[in-house]
Amino acid sequence: MYRAVDKVGNTVDFLLRAKRDKEAARRYFEKAIDQNGAPDTVTIDRSGANLAGLHAVNADRETSIRIRQTKYLNNIVEQDHRAIKRRTRSMLGFKAFRCARILLSGIELMHMIAKGQMKNANKPSAARQFYSLAM
């Protein structure tokens, strides 16, 4: 699962892929950049797939994105991911990849609503926002 979190802890984007390779990382970074704009700096873990994906994205761009591979600066992403791990750990795995994708998208969406990222003008509760999106 790929996740992007900004400095404040708001979820920028997430993507679940069957394989964690260069192509999956590149698609994820391109999708996140298209939807949210290009960042100045990206902090990633020591994953070689993430590094290769960012190098591939930088090869196609005029202004390159600065890449930091720092274990401790990546803690913001890991702490945000903790809520998803807490919910999925008790499930003991998923039967199919499709089910995992659907469930994790719903959990991520509910987590974003709970963090206050999807506020409306009339400020409905988190449950009402989720129900309105589901139906």
Image (tube, grey):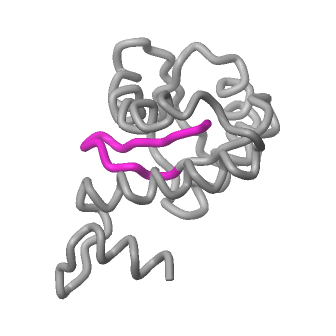
Which quadrant of the rendered structure holds the N terminus?
A: top right
Magenta region includes residue 2: yes
Identify the residue shown where x is 20% and y is 85%: 121
- Image: 34 above or below 108: below
Q: How many dots with numbers?
A: 0
Is 121 positioned to the left or the right of 37 in the image? left
Is 49 positioned to the left or the right of 1 in the image? right
Magenta region includes residue 120: no
Q: Nearer the viewer, residue 127 or 13?
A: 127
* Quadrant of the rendered image containing residue 81: top left
Could you say where residue 7 lies in the image, as x and y percent from the top left?
29, 40
Q: Which residues are magenta?
A: 1-13
Identify the residue shown where x is 35% and y is 14%: 72
Identify the residue shown where x is 36% and y is 37%: 83
Q: Nearer the viewer, residue 64 or 20?
A: 20
- Image: 69 above or below 29: above
Could you say where residue 85 lies in the image, as x and y percent from the top left?
45, 31
Could you say where residue 50 lies in the image, as x and y percent from the top left?
66, 27
Identify the residue shown where x is 53% and y is 19%: 45
Is 110 positioned to the left or the right of 54 in the image? left
